[in-house]
Image (spheres, grey):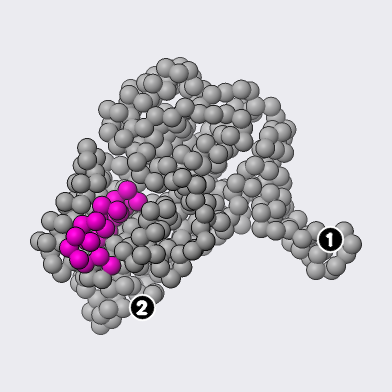
Amino acid sequence: MFGRSNTKLFLVIFTMIIALIASSCSSGDDDSSSASSSEESSASTEAGGEDSVVLTQESDWAVRGAAAAGSAAEIPSFSAGILHVVEAAESDQRCGFALVDALEVVGVTPSEFDGAGVPEKMAEGMDVLLGQGHDVIFGISVEPGAIAVQLQRAADEGVTFINMCGTVRKNDLVAASPVPSDYAQAALAGQYIIDMLYEENPNAPEGQIAVIEFPQILSLFQRVATVEKMLEEWDGIEIVARHEVDFANPNEDIRSAVLSIVTANPDIDVIYTLGDFMIPAAVSALDELGVTGTEVKIVSAQSGSPSVLSLIEAGKVAAVVDPRLDASGWIAVDIWLDHLARGNEMNDVDWHQYNHFFEYKLITADNIDPDYEMRPGYVVETPVTGFVEFFTAKWTAEYGLG
């Protein structure tokens, strides 16, 4: 539904896409050589030689992973903990499942603690995990400010803390933070909203948007800031209402807020949400008002979880952006293994060679995959990039794992 749009916005998004492609294509000499070997194998197959090998997408990524392996090294035994920001959110669960899968390849079963969206609970969780004597703790989108005392304790005790899944504020005590871009996710959602309103009124697009937000979490703040910046170019499209989520009772809080917002603003066009945990409650409120998917559209900057995909199929959610959060856990474990086995310093730069594993996909009723598979709470939709095969083959080659 991409109609005419502001030139500046297209340039921004075009530049971002080029950057992602460049990241994929120039992610190191090893990656380039593996891509070359893949092309050579394909050429050999087409030639029809007796030794020809047909590479499937899965085996191709495994070949790339093996080619990207570092020097052979041994991984000392270690224990790991996972601190969830709010495990009730399916995006959090999805990240947790992927991280557990990656650690399982290494033969490690982590312990987990749910911060439940409450800073005091997150701090308590860090204390618990530190008390268990772990070597590394993976935080799923946990803001460093909520666990500042515990991060210092971790540093003093030689425990590594790695953030994953969602952007958090910069902190020197966070070893690395391999996460998808919130700006990229929000840009896709924002452009969808603008084009939708433009299509309805090409001469003078106009519309009213309500935002459900929680700016204390940096990733959520960035998803709103991006859309706000995009809307500066459109005088007729404005944010007329916003509500900050109360995590003490988020579902009822969001439902009540959407009821109040739509009642007070009967011409509202879009409810803009920032994550999957906001969507079911918003749908419930719109259902109660009888305007779901018709008069009021729900657009989310991030999702791809089972319940939300079902709501898209049912016509109750217009569009969401799936940044393939699963990849974050595999990248985080790869960073940790390299540090543990070789003593290489962890940083927030080197992991960007794997940016191409984050697939920014705008999902609507027109392109939802009807064949996605689930295990409880986890979407196993076939990714474009085979990060599971890539890292499993890489770790097998360099550490003898897999």
- Residue 191's x, y, as percent? 35, 66
Quarter of the picture holding the N terminus? bottom left
Q: Amino acid at mark 2?
A: Arg
Please state which of residues 217 and 126 is positioned toward the viewer in this rendering.
Answer: 126
Please state which of residues 33 and 312 is positioned toward the viewer in this rendering.
Answer: 312
> How many numbered marks have been drawn onto this rendered protein structure?
2
- Residue 102's x, y, as percent? 57, 38
Q: Residue furthest bottom?
A: 203
Q: Is residue 136 magenta?
A: no
- Residue 33's x, y, as percent? 72, 52
Which disc number belongs to residue 273?
A: none
Q: Residue at x 30, y 69 (%)?
A: 194
Q: Amino acid at mark 1?
A: Ser
Q: Residue at x 39, y 46 (%)?
A: 90
Q: Residue furthest right?
A: 50
Q: In the figure, residue 9 lies in which quadrant?
A: bottom left
Which disc number belongs to residue 4?
A: 2
Residue holding disc 1: 52
**From the viewer's perspective, is residue 287 above or below residue 257?**
below
* Callout 2 secondary element: loop
Of the numbered discs 1 and 2, the one sitting upstream in the chain is: 2
* Callout 1 secondary element: loop
Q: Residue furthest left?
A: 264
Q: Is residue 298 visible?
A: yes
**From the viewer's perspective, is residue 69 above or below residue 318?**
above
Front disc: 1 or 2: 1
Q: In the visual, does 163 lie left or right of 51?
A: left
State which region is magenta. 271-293
Q: Residue at x 58, y 55 (%)?
A: 385
How far apart are labels 1 and 2 at the CA level? Answer: 48 Å
Q: Residue at x 25, y 65 (%)?
A: 292
Mark 1 Cα-neighbour bin, 10 Å: few <14, some 14–19, many ≥20: some
